[in-house]
Amino acid sequence: MIPLSVLFLVLLETLAVLCAFRALTASRTPQGAVAWVVFLIAAPYVAVVSYLFLGHSKVRGYVVARRDSQEAVAAIEAARLAHPPKPTSQTAEARLFETIAANPVMSGNAFDVLIDGEETFDAILGAIDKAQTYILMQLYIVRDDPTGQVLSDHLVAAANRGVSVRFLYDSVGCSRLTRSYIATLTDAGVEMYDTNALRGPTKRFQVNFRNHRKTLVVDGHVGFTGGLNVGEEYMGRDPKFGPWRDTHCQFKGPMVQQLQLIFVEDWHWATQQSLIDELNWTMIPQPEDQDGLILAGGPADAMDTGNLYFNSVITAAQDRVWIASPYFVPDPDVITTLQLAALKGVDVRILVPSKADHWITWLAAFAYFDELRDAGVQFFTYSTGFMHQKTVLVDDKLASVGTFNLDSRSCRLNFEQTAILFDEKANRDLEIMFQDDFSRAELMTDPIQSQKYWVRILAPVARLFAPVL
């Protein structure tokens, strides 16, 4: 009789070989395939479990209505004809973003930049209090703390006055959210669902795929997205981080319906319910008449939308490209694009925090700074609290506020979104914001050899985990 230990070892090695074969056929790069094969064969006890959770790069079965629904495609085309962008926005770059986003650039929007927690939550809570028909809310992190309780109170009040409230949250980001918090909302009639854990036990291995989007749509008239989650730290009340520097945005007009459609896709993934017939799709042009679109990306896309987004904004720059991201772990193609932009004389600036909230990601960034600085890329470290915003400014023609971090996770593994404006006013607003941020930051000039000993040692090690950071 074969001993159980031997049988277990044979089964484990067989599973490791099967995973290695899948890695060979499914990995995005030869380097990634080789790394997984070596890891799986050499250390199956650890590698098989790691691969089951981290080795997948695509989500199967997610329906992107903007691409897969004939009705949605027809409606998008009709909206494009009804709200065409101004001639100044009909550029090759704008058409590229339309293709990547599967959304058209449309006119008739009104766009406001919201700086930090107080301004953002005042606007969000004000919109919730004015809701008449429905509220669509999605968060990566929501905490059962004073800030989270304020949000809960406003949502409960909305539900009590007959407003339909639908709330999606991410099980990884909200791993510490209390059951009592969810119960309070659901008992009031709020439909609240975890985006990751409603599709059966086979989906438990998809913990690597996180929905990092932050969305609020009220009555189909006003929309919000950006970097802020809900918790005391986002209001600057956490003594560990101090002032919390973040950026959100509010908009009205046709872009609201684009954001709403993205929420509908996430809701369908989580619940298998379609909301299309229950929502308001009337596009009301705003007198500000700003041109823009919503770009969403994630592991359900055929291509790596996040990487295409960052490469596109960088290559579009003729004079400057300023990027703020709390995490800097770019893919090799983004590194090359940044280098080329700087080498041709573009003012390439990247704003990162001086503090760390995720140590391994913070450390990994140090392994990239020197090679990019040698090409002329400038890095600024924000030291007045923690910097968490995800914003981009290109020349005087493009401004972007959303949820994309400049790291591999946001570009390939997370569900993300950003609002892109092709508008001079929006560009000026972000320029003023960036200039103020740079005035509170320090230009990083010291090479990694001048950093503390533990940083010099651990940064190259942390970089090895770049594909999942």
Image (cartoon, rainbow, N blue to C red):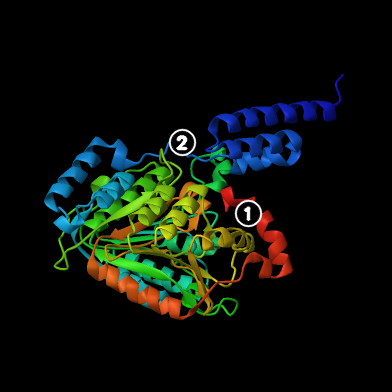
Residue occupying the point 55% across, 29% down: 25
Extreme-front residue of the structure: 344
Q: Which residue is mark 2?
A: 60
Nearer to us in this view, 305 or 455:
455
Nearer to us in this view, 370 or 244:
370
Q: Amino acid at mark 1?
A: Arg
Residue 145 place in picture, x, y as percent: 52, 72
Label 2 secondary element: loop
Residue 258 place in picture, x, y as percent: 27, 52
- Taking 74 as reference, is 98 above or below it? below
Nearer to us in this view, 375 or 149:
375
Left or right placement of residue 342 versus residue 79 in this view:
right
Question: Which label's residue is closer to the chain start, 2 or 1?
Answer: 2
Residue 321 place in picture, x, y as percent: 38, 63
State the quadrant of the N terminus. top right
Question: Could you say which quadrant of the image residue 204 lies in?
Answer: top right
Mark 1 surroundings within 10 Å by alpha-carbon count, few (fewer than 14), some (14 through 19), many (20 or more): many
Residue occupying the point 73% across, 36% down: 44
- Taking 299 as reference, is 388 above or below it? below
Instruction: Tell me, for residue 463, which label it has, or none.
Output: 1
Instruction: Tell me, for residue 116, which label it has, or none.
Output: none
Label 1 secondary element: helix
Residue occupying the point 41% across, 38% down: 302
Residue occupying the point 52% across, 68% down: 144
